[in-house]
Structure formats: structure tokens, C-alpha cells
Amino acid sequence: MKLYRLLTGQDDAAFCHRVTDALNKGWALHGSPSMTFNAQTGQVIAAQAIVKDVEGKNYHPDMKLSEQ
């Protein structure tokens, strides 16, 4: 099965660590990152799509994607 996740968060070191952690758990970047500016908070928000192929499992809407 192929899994998809969209990681989002403030563009800071913690976000980069989340993406790095996912990459080291077998996820792959899917497309370019996206960024937007939240004028109310003054923060830049980043988003990065990631995908992963998992053999021998079937998708179910209740599964926790980050644990696959």
C-alpha cells in the first residue's frame, strides 16, 4: 500500500527535525515544500508532503499513518 502524509508547522528547527525523522523512518519527500505567512502570529508556516510504500498491509482509515 502507498501512504501519504502532509507535515505542517511553523518553519523552524522542530519542523525540520520532524521531516528528517520521517525520512529516516522510510518516508520520501513528495513534491516541493510550501510556505505561507500567518500575519496574525507573524510566523511562517511550512508544509511538506511525504509518501511511503508499505508491503504486506492493507490500508484502513483508522490506522495511524505516522506509525507505519
Image (cartoon, rainbow, N blue to C red):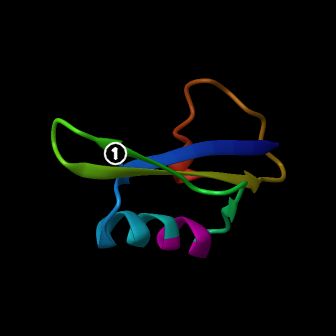
**Residue type (three-letter) at the residue carrying disc 1:** Phe
Per the rendered image, the range of residues in magenta is 20-24
Query: Is label 1 in a helix, a strand or a loop?
Result: strand
Question: Along the horizontal axis of the image, is 14 left or right of 46?
Answer: left
Q: How far across and how far down the image is residue 43, in percent?
A: 24, 51
Q: Nearer the viewer, residue 28 or 42?
A: 42
Q: How far across and how far down the image is residue 39, in percent?
A: 23, 39
Question: Along the horizontal axis of the image, is 14 left or right of 28?
Answer: left
The image quarter in which residue 3 lies: top right
Could you tell me which residue is drawn at 52 percent across and 39 percent down?
A: 64
Q: How far across and how far down the image is residue 8, in percent?
A: 43, 47
Q: Nearer the viewer, residue 32 or 18?
A: 32
Report the residue marked by disc 1. Answer: 37
Question: Along the horizontal axis of the image, is 23 left or right of 35?
Answer: right
Could you tell me which residue is drawn at 68 percent across and 61 percent down?
A: 29
Could you tell me which residue is drawn at 37 percent across and 63 percent down?
A: 15
Count of numbered badges drawn on the protein: 1
